[in-house]
Image (cartoon, coloured by chain):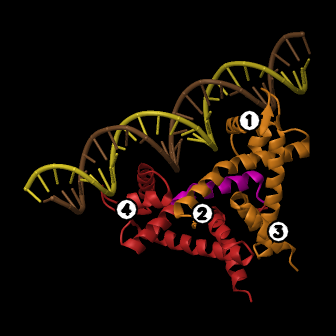
Chain colours: A orange, B red, C yellow, D brown
DNA sequence: CTCAAAATATAGCCCAAGCTATATTTATTA
DNA sequence: TAATAAATATAGCTTGGGCTATATTTTGAG
């Protein structure tokens, strides 16, 4: 009996854990985007694109550094570590797949892009694989 | 130009708002379930099913009361207001639809039930309608 | 009916994530 | 190059949602 069905408490705990990394995923993806677009990720731009005040972005970047996902020096731009860059790639790919899946089942594009922002963080690898298989069908 | 495409900041802000009501939705649905199953919703049972400590459940119930979703008297069970019961019904229906949609696109049942717990809170009415239409197809 | 057990409430702590206001540093321009 | 503007950091506050420890109330057994 090593795999009894997960209890409600297990499911809720899992959703809480996913939520706690969601913000880190968003920041890492955004930093990767900014570097790709403009060559650097400045705190002011991160704050602007995330829709938060600048000190909020500074604080979250500090958390990214604690978690080994980013580096930065005072008054300078933010960079991703290897782990951060790898996470950004995975998050970006997953985001695209979620949007495509939503559109494939009939969700209008704008709603798909809005909803994907919250949904993506809760899509497990198993679900992601299923989404990809579904999108490849004829 | 009343409907320019939502900015990144808009999308993130929207996801943050959805997240802030997610916990209330879960509690309200659970309280409805407990009342249906056992005739009453006790704080200890809520805490157990949510997988949190009892004072955490007490505090969240207080927030439900502030938001007009539940009522309770000291040392007594928790009840839903009309608004709370209506929300519980909507949440329960949406949860079922999300699980069914995930299974319909090929997600294994267990993964579908786990992932739905986090996904459901970010599914807009437009997406929900699309899911229902998709599930009704031949 | 009393008293012990169970349930609930309260106090007080932590951390994350938001904010405003202000200090500090870097960059630009006159 | 000195002064100003822009960017970043820091301080300190709020709220939400966790926790443990403990007080209080209700319930149920003898």
The location of residue B99, given as percent across then percent down, is: 64, 73
* Residue density around tag 2, few if under 14, some if 14–19, many if 20 or more, within 10 Å: few
Q: Do the residues indicated by labels 4 and 1 lie within the same chain of the protein?
A: no
Q: CA distance from mark 3 to mark 4?
A: 43 Å
Cβ atoms at labels 2 and 1 below 8 Å apart: no
Q: Nearer the viewer, mark 3 or mark 2?
A: 2
Q: Which residue is mark 4?
A: B42
Regarding mark 1 in the picture, which secondary structure is present there?
helix
In screen coordinates, is B91 left or right of A117? left
Q: Do the residues indicated by labels 2 and 1 lie within the same chain of the protein?
A: yes
Label whose residue precedes the other's in the sequence (3 or 2): 2
Q: CA distance from mark 2 to mark 1?
A: 37 Å
The magenta stretch spans which residues? B5-24
* Residue density around tag 3, few if under 14, some if 14–19, many if 20 or more, within 10 Å: some
User: Which one is nearer the viewer's eye here, B79 or C6?
Assistant: C6
Report the predominant secondary structure element of the magenta stretch. Answer: helix
Q: Which residue is mark 2?
A: A2
Cβ atoms at labels 3 and 1 below 8 Å apart: no
For image coordinates 62% across by 69% down, the residue present is B113
Residue B112: which quarter of the image? bottom right
Q: Which residue is mark 1?
A: A65
**A79 above or below A104?**
above
The location of residue D1, given as percent across then percent down, is: 90, 10
In screen coordinates, is A136 left or right of D26? right
Q: CA distance from mark 4 to mark 1?
A: 42 Å
Regarding mark 2 in the picture, which secondary structure is present there?
loop
For image coordinates 55% across by 70% down, the residue present is B91
Residue A28: which quarter of the image? top right
């Amino acid at each position: 009996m090593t795999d009894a069905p997960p209890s409600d408490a297990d499911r809720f705990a899992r959703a809480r854990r996913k939520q706690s990394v969601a913000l880190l995923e968003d920041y890492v993806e955004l930093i990767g985007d900014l570097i790709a677009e403009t060559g650097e990720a400045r705190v002011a731009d991160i704050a602007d694109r995330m829709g938060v005040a600048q000190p909020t972005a500074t604080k979250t970047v500090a958390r990214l550094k604690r978690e080994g996902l980013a580096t930065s020096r005072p008054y300078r731009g933010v960079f991703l570590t290897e782990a951060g860059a790898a996470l950004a790639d995975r998050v970006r790919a997953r985001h695209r797949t979620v949007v495509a899946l939503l559109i494939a089942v009939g969700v209008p594009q704008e709603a798909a892009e809005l909803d994907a922002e919250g949904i993506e963080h809760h899509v497990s690898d198993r679900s992601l694989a299923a989404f990809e298989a579904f999108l490849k069908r004829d």
